[in-house]
Image (cartoon, rainbow, N blue to C red):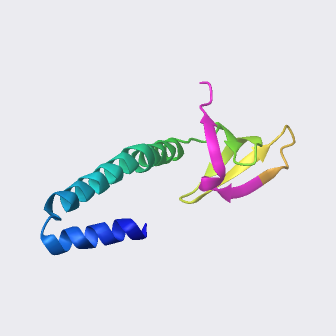
Amino acid sequence: MNAFILLTADAAANGQMGGLGFSYIISIVLMLGIFYFLMIKPQKKEQKRVEAMLADMEVGDVVVTTSGFYGVLIDITEDDVIVEFGSNKNCRIPMRKSAISQVEKAEK
């Protein structure tokens, strides 16, 4: 590492740093581009899919919560939903929309 620093310092002193600096810039831009297409773009795509799924929910749809419970939507408000679990009509739990991981549309 120290030898590399000495070589670059010597090249900079002699005015030979032009091509070497440009290749560093190109490699950094390529790494950032690869990082964007492998990490950020798929995450944004998944986020849009989840937002569309939560926006299309209707009363009567079967949902799966993030903890793995299946239930039926009873009521939907702006940020919350009320989900009925099991065949017991008394088991209704309010929860955040973000706690829903999957939605299966009700048969009509």
Expressed as whole percent of the image width and height from the top left, the position of residue 61 reads 63, 36
- Say which quarter of the image contains residue 64: top right
Residue 58 magenta: no
Against 108, residue 18 (above or below) is below
Closer to us: 36 or 97: 36
Against 14, residue 35 (above or below) is above
Quadrant holding the N terminus: bottom left
Expressed as whole percent of the image width and height from the top left, the position of residue 92 reads 78, 51
Expressed as whole percent of the image width and height from the top left, the position of residue 98 reads 60, 54
In this image, 38 relative to 86: left or right?
Answer: left
Residue 97 magenta: yes
Closer to us: 51 or 62: 51
Q: What residue lies at 66% left-to-right and 53% top-to-bottom?
A: 99
Closer to us: 102 or 85: 102
Q: What residue lies at 20% left-to-right and 67% top-to-bottom?
A: 11
Segment tinted magenta in the rendering:
93-108
Closer to us: 21 or 85: 21
Quadrant holding the C terminus: top right
Against 28, residue 64 (above or below) is above
In this image, 51 relative to 4: left or right?
Answer: right
Q: What residue lies at 15% left-to-right and 64% top-to-bottom?
A: 16
Expressed as whole percent of the image width and height from the top left, the position of residue 68 reads 76, 43
- Say which quarter of the image contains residue 10: bottom left
